[in-house]
């Protein structure tokens, strides 16, 4: 947005109170918000489109926000004949603190709104969240600018320079109001349509590229397994990556394609993400839980390293049109694969960084199961942090066909089952159903000290 300038050499005292001061502070805030918004939007679009990490995208957006903010202040002064050496300190004094406040608020909100950073520029949630974040940033910056002006700082420095840009305050205010309405509407709609339910429970389709038949299906009255098929309910997982070199960092690319052959782009947030990608070798080793990023065209991308040669099952776990789905295909890591035997069943597992996790809860085929996990370190109970909207995340896979079981945390207010409460305090509890006899591998993930840790268990299920 171009701001024309004209030179004033008559200094008028800035108001120090009342509506006149509010008007000046509002103009200053909208001026900073314009440059901030231009840089923020460009940074978010570029970083998201190129698959930058959240922090990489934010760093780019912040840098561009300062660049455009300073530019909007500097160009009118340069056109008015001021030397560049004189303009720089004016721009720095005018905008730095205000833009810094806006950027802190704006990016904190983008990180805190579930799915906003992962949704991509082709998703209305991205634009709705960004609109609200920028407007809230401007609201927070308004009293900051007002306070600065009363002390002769911030935009008061620009005023004292004697060169005041003609800024379209009314137009920018109208645009900001429209952005607030749009963003609020989007976030309300997202909250209503994302019901916060657990991971799925949809029965698997009956065909797949490699795992087309569930040989255990007849054993359970209700089969909650998924991930045996590449297609279900008109949706298909299509991998653009079928081979990755073992031990080397690579990029896994894929799409979820609808019945019309087009990439699906409208995914709902589930457990704070729009896509959960589970990668595990066919001997149930090398487990990874990833959160890829989607481009505007519906292409998902994530960095991944397959440590050893072998066949790896890739599970795309997501929610679309109100239904949870898990679709799966296989990626090959060429080379001589050495299969690892499944560890013996045990009720305790130790992570690579010294956490000890105890598993309790009965499990029998075709019956509901409640599994509780207690985490300790150095003999002391560990207070878990929220991870993906709960005190932990559980993935359960069946040995052989790698059927993906539906698991979900116990309902809010019932996170600790009564049979374990006295013994284990706040141990997170998960509900699932083992559809058949056999061995299952359970991957329990939890967060402590800001890091996510994984404990793996083998569970033998009998009648």
Image (cartoon, rainbow, N blue to C red):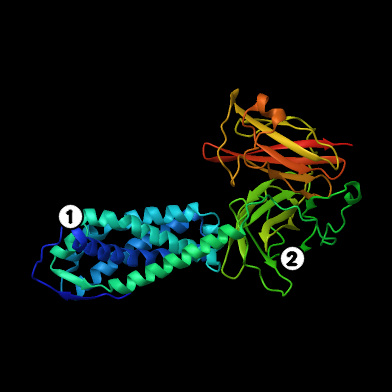
* Image spot of residue 268 (x, y percent): 62, 60
Q: Is residue 117 left or right of residue 39?
A: right
> Can residue 185 be seen at all in this image of the molecule?
yes
Q: Is residue 255 left or right of residue 56?
A: right
Of the 4 image quadrants, the one containing the C terminus is top right
Q: Quadrant of residue 420?
A: top right
* Labels in figure, total: 2
Q: Label 1's element?
A: helix
> Can residue 46 be seen at all in this image of the molecule?
no
Q: Residue at x 14, y 62 (%)?
A: 14
Of badges 2 and 1, the one in the foreground is 1
Dot 2 and dot 1 residues touching (CB under 8 Å): no
Q: Label 2 to label 1, Cα distance in Å? A: 61 Å
Q: Is residue 375 above or below residue 279?
A: above
Q: Label 2's element?
A: strand
Q: Is residue 340 above or below residue 193?
A: above
How many C-alpha atoms fall within 10 Å of the one at disc 2: few (<14), some, or many (≥20)? many
Q: Which of the numbered marks, if any, corresponds to residue 171?
A: none
First of labels 2, 1 by sequence position: 1
* Image spot of residue 71 (x, y percent): 28, 68
Residue topped by disc 2: 236
Q: Residue at x 60, y 43 (%)?
A: 390
The residue lying toward the viewer, choosing from 235 and 253, is 235
Residue farthest to the left? 10
* Image spot of residue 429 (x, y percent): 68, 37
Of the 4 image quadrants, the one containing the N terminus is bottom left
Q: Is residue 384 above or below residue 225?
A: above
Q: Quadrant of residue 101?
A: bottom left
* Image spot of residue 459 (x, y percent): 79, 36
Q: Is residue 151 left or right of residue 51?
A: left
Residue farthest to the top? 379
Residue topped by disc 1: 150
């Amino acid at each position: 947005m171009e701001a024309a300038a004209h030179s004033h050499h008559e200094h008028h005292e800035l108001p120090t109170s009342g509506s006149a001061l509010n008007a000046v502070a509002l103009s200053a805030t909208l001026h900073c918000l314009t440059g901030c918004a231009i840089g923020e939007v460009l940074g978010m679009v570029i970083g998201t489109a190129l698959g930058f990490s959240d922090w990489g995208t934010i760093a780019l957006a912040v840098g561009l926000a300062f660049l455009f903010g300073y530019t909007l202040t500097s160009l009118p002064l340069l056109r008015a004949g001021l030397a560049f050496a004189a303009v720089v300190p004016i721009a720095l004094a005018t905008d730095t603190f205000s833009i810094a406040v806006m950027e802190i608020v704006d990016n904190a909100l983008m990180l805190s709104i579930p799915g906003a950073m992962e949704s991509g520029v082709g998703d209305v949630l991205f634009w709705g969240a960004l609109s609200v974040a920028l407007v809230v940033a401007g609201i927070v910056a308004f009293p900051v600018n007002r306070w600065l002006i009363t002390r002769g700082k911030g935009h008061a420095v620009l005023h004292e320079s004697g060169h005041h840009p003609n800024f379209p305050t009314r137009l920018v205010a109208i645009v900001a109001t429209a952005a607030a309405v749009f963003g609020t509407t989007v976030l309300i709609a997202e909250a209503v349509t994302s019901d916060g339910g657990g991971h799925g429970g949809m029965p698997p389709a009956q065909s797949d590229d490699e795992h087309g038949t569930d040989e255990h299906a007849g054993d359970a009255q209700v089969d909650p397994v998924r991930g045996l098929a590449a297609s279900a309910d008109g949706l298909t997982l299509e991998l653009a990556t079928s081979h990755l070199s073992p031990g080397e960092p690579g990029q896994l690319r894929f799409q979820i394609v609808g019945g019309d052959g087009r990439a699906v782009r409208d995914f709902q947030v589930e457990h704070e993400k729009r896509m959960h990608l589970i990668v595990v070798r066919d001997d149930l080793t090398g487990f990874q839980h990833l959160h890829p990023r989607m481009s505007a065209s519906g292409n998902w991308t994530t960095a991944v390293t397959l440590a050893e040669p072998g066949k790896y099952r890739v599970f795309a776990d997501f929610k679309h049109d109100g239904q949870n789905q898990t679709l799966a295909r296989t990626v090959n890591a060429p080379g001589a694969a050495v299969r690892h035997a499944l560890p013996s069943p045990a009720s305790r597992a130790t992570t690579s960084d010294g956490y000890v996790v105890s598993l309790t809860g009965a499990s029998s085929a075709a019956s509901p199961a409640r599994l509780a996990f207690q985490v300790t370190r150095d003999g002391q109970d560990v207070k878990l942090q929220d991870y993906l909207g709960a005190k932990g995340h559980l993935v359960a896979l069946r040995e052989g066909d790698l059927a993906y079981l539906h698991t979900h945390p116990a309902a809010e207010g019932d996170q600790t089952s009564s049979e374990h409460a006295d013994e284990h305090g706040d141990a997170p509890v998960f509900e699932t159903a083992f559809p058949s006899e056999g061995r299952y591998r359970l991957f329990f993930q939890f967060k402590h000290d800001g890091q996510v840790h994984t404990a793996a268990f083998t569970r033998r299920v009998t009648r």
